[in-house]
């Protein structure tokens, strides 16, 4: 059952990669192409398991699944170079990203970001995408001891905003992110990107929507009905 939306919503906390900007797909392609090029093709299931998960946890996952012979340093060096070259050409926003961010800003609702990406990279991507000025609080991998799916990033974001988690909403695209946000006691909207919504996500309490614009429409609906 979906967690009830707080009334009023006092803050909104967003994931970044795959939620606001289309970087998860770029990561996926970069990893797949690099693994193929170095002679260690990764199964789709492993690539999917890496979505929405921090770099350190992904490294551990690869090492455990592929063993000590897997050239981890080379893999990441080449995949990162490919990823960065793609983003240098421009960071693509997810459909409806500006629509929903402008909705919250117009309503005077403070915004936070909770991302599994390291601070320097997160700041660069937000600036490249033109989104950094929307956020009152930015929580990155460098700010927490435990990354998603642990709830710490969301709890810290709410704390820095000075808003109780129960008065916030979260917006996510990944399984790890949904589990983190719902475990923090936050009403969570899942807008799938690479991974489809599953029964587990709805059982965790997420409301699944097809787009960020659909979220804006949902939030406007009670006002329009009145």
Image (cartoon, rainbow, N blue to C red):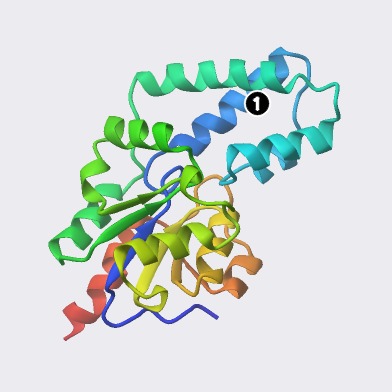
Q: Is residue 67 above or below residue 186?
A: above
Q: Is residue 194 above or below residue 177?
A: above
Q: Is residue 2 above or below residue 174?
A: below
Residue 158: name its quadrant: bottom left
Whole-percent x, y for residue 124 in the image = 34, 30
* Residue 209 in sight: no
Q: Residue at x 33, y 24 (%)?
A: 90
Q: Residue at x 73, y 38 (%)?
A: 60
Whole-percent x, y for residue 107 in the image = 15, 67
Q: For the residue labelled by badge 1, is the local secondary structure a helix, a strand or a loop?
A: helix
Residue 121: name its quadrant: top left
For the N terminus, which image quadrant? bottom right
Whole-percent x, y for residue 26 in the image = 50, 30
Left or right of 195 on screen, residue 86: left
For the C terminus, which image quadrant? bottom left
The residue closer to the viewer here, 60 or 171, is: 60
Farthest bottom residue? 226
Whole-percent x, y for residue 96 in the image = 30, 50
Mark 1 — residue? Answer: 32
């Amino acid at each position: 059952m979906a967690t009830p939306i707080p009334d009023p919503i006092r803050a909104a906390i967003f994931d970044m990669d795959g939620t606001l900007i289309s970087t998860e797909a770029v990561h996926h392609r970069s990893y797949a192409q690099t693994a193929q090029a170095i002679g260690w093709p990764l199964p789709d299931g492993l690539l999917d398991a890496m979505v929405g998960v921090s770099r350190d946890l992904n490294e551990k996952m690869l090492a455990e699944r592929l063993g000590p012979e897997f050239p981890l340093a080379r893999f990441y060096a080449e995949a990162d170079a490919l990823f960065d070259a793609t983003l240098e050409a421009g960071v693509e926003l997810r459909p409806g990203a500006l629509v929903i961010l402008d909705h919250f800003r117009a309503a005077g609702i403070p915004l936070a970001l909770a991302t599994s990406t390291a601070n320097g990279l997160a700041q660069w991507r937000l600036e490249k995408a033109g989104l950094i000025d929307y956020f009152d609080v930015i929580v990155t991998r460098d700010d927490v001891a435990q990354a998603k799916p642990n709830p710490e990033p969301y709890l810290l974001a709410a704390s820095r905003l000075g808003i109780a988690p129960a008065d916030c909403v979260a917006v996510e695209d990944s399984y790890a992110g949904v589990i983190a946000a719902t475990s923090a006691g936050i009403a969570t909207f899942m807008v799938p990107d690479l991974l489809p919504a599953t029964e587990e996500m709805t059982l965790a309490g997420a409301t699944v929507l097809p787009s960020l614009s659909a979220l804006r429409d949902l939030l406007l609906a009670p006002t329009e009905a009145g």
